[in-house]
Amino acid sequence: MRWIWIDRFLEFESGKSARAVKNLSHAEEYFADHFPGWPVMPGTLILEGLAQAGGILVGEANQFREKVVLAKIPRALFHREAMAGDQLVYEVELQHLRPEGASVLGRVLVDGAVIVEAEIFFAHLDKSRSSQLFGDRNFVFTGEMKYLLDRLVKPAGASA
């Protein structure tokens, strides 16, 4: 099963930044167990959504020529919980883009207040090597994702 922690992108500036949203419904499976009577989204899933937004930004910056994998999260600061009924806004800003990988700074907001801040590093894997190690189906960045992003990202000089 594949888990995507983004409902949609609100903004996407190629090679620079992105904003995405995730609406937390009481129907999310993890709320039944985490925690009964106090439906809190696990912090790891909040970071996963932020990493997915950042990874898509990094992948798109290279026209998805290479696979992007999460390498490490050297810093994450949690200010409060995310609860059922909240709308999470993931904001990521590309800091460094190099042949071997990239880094982003990210924030998660609820009602305009920052609830999580993180620095996330990604590694690039060339397609031939990543297919040998992982196969093609283990990644978020499918042709369908590229198709959807092509419709969101405005070409240089295009009008709004």
Image (cartoon, helix red, strand yellow):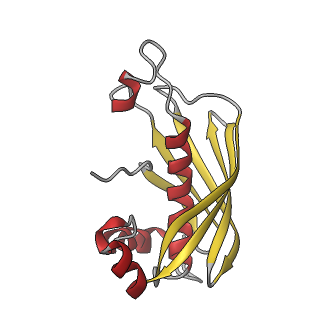
Seen in the picture, residue 78 relative to 102 is either above or below; the reply is above
Q: Nearer the viewer, residue 25 or 157?
A: 25
Q: How many marks overall?
A: 0
At x 60% / y 28%, what residue is drawn?
Answer: 81
Q: Which quadrant holds the C terminus?
A: bottom right
Report the side of 12 relative to 106 (left or right).
left
Q: Residue 34 at what x, y percent from top left? A: 44, 24
Q: Residue 75 at what x, y percent from top left? A: 72, 50
At x 64% / y 72%, what residue is drawn?
Answer: 102
At x 37% / y 76%, what residue is drawn?
Answer: 133
Residue lying at the far top in this picture: please name it. Answer: 37
Q: Nearer the viewer, residue 25 or 40?
A: 40
At x 34% / y 81%, what residue is drawn?
Answer: 132
Asked if residue 154 can be seen in this view, the reply is no
Q: Residue 18 at what x, y percent from top left? A: 59, 61
Seen in the picture, residue 86 relative to 123 is either above or below; the reply is above
Rendered image quadrant of residue 25: top left
Residue lying at the far front in this picture: please name it. Answer: 133
Report the side of 1 relative to 152 (left or right).
left
Q: Nearer the viewer, residue 151 or 73?
A: 73
Report the side of 141 relative to 83 (left or right).
left
Q: Residue 100 at what x, y percent from top left? A: 62, 81
Asked if residue 96 can be seen in this view, the reply is yes
